[in-house]
Image: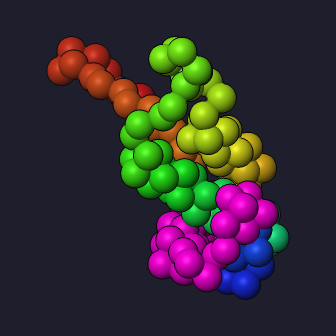
């Protein structure tokens, strides 16, 4: 993965300079690399988009935590369906779907058996 490309995409997604968030971008690249399947092509450009989406989502969550108070007209509650965190989460899900043949499945199926059942 090209870190410079990930930084450029992070700037596109977040509107912020990636130079101020280098540790966050590197963490996202590391996290994305750990998701890869053993036979996946690590140079696939989709992974750079995924890493940038991961960094953007982490950035949005940090900013949301910092800005807990929100000013709203007439004291109304903000509509969280359109928050920057939910938007970044949708973007992240889109790139996870786009990279599904390159990364380990993000879901886990748990099966339980009692002692009376036969496993074939």
Say which residue appears at 56% left-offset and 41% top-offset.
Answer: 85
Q: Single out the residue that lies furthest toward the right.
A: 45
Image position, residue 56 (x, y; %): 61, 58
Please, what is the dominant secondary structure of the magenta stretch? helix
Q: Is residue 5 above or below residue 96?
A: below
Residue 1 left/right relative to 120: right
Please identify the quarter of the rendering in which residue 74 is found. top right
Image position, residue 119 (x, y; %): 35, 27
Please identify the quarter of the rendering in which residue 110 is found. top left
Is 31 colored magenta in this rendering?
yes
Image position, residue 61 (x, y; %): 48, 49
> Could you tell me if residue 34 is visible in this image?
no
Q: Nearer the viewer, residue 116 or 104?
A: 104
Residue 74 left/right relative to 113: right
Q: Is residue 47 above or below residue 106?
A: below
Q: Single out the residue that lies furthest toward the front.
A: 74
Say which residue appears at 72% left-offset and 68% top-offset.
Answer: 11
The region drawn magenta spans 11-38
Say which residue appears at 18% left-offset and 21% top-offset.
Answer: 115
């Amino acid at each position: 993965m090209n870190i410079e490309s990930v930084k450029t995409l992070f700037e596109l997604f977040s509107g912020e300079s990636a130079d101020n968030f280098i540790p966050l971008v590197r963490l996202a690249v590391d996290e994305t690399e750990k998701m890869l399947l053993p036979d996946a092509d690590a140079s696939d450009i989709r992974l750079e988009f995924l890493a940038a989406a991961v960094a953007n989502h982490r950035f949005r969550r940090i900013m949301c935590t910092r800005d807990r108070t929100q000013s709203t007209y007439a004291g109304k509650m903000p509509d969280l369906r359109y928050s920057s965190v939910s938007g970044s989460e949708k973007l992240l899900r889109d790139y996870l779907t786009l990279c599904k043949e390159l990364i380990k499945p993000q879901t886990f199926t748990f099966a339980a058996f009692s002692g009376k059942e036969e496993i074939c």
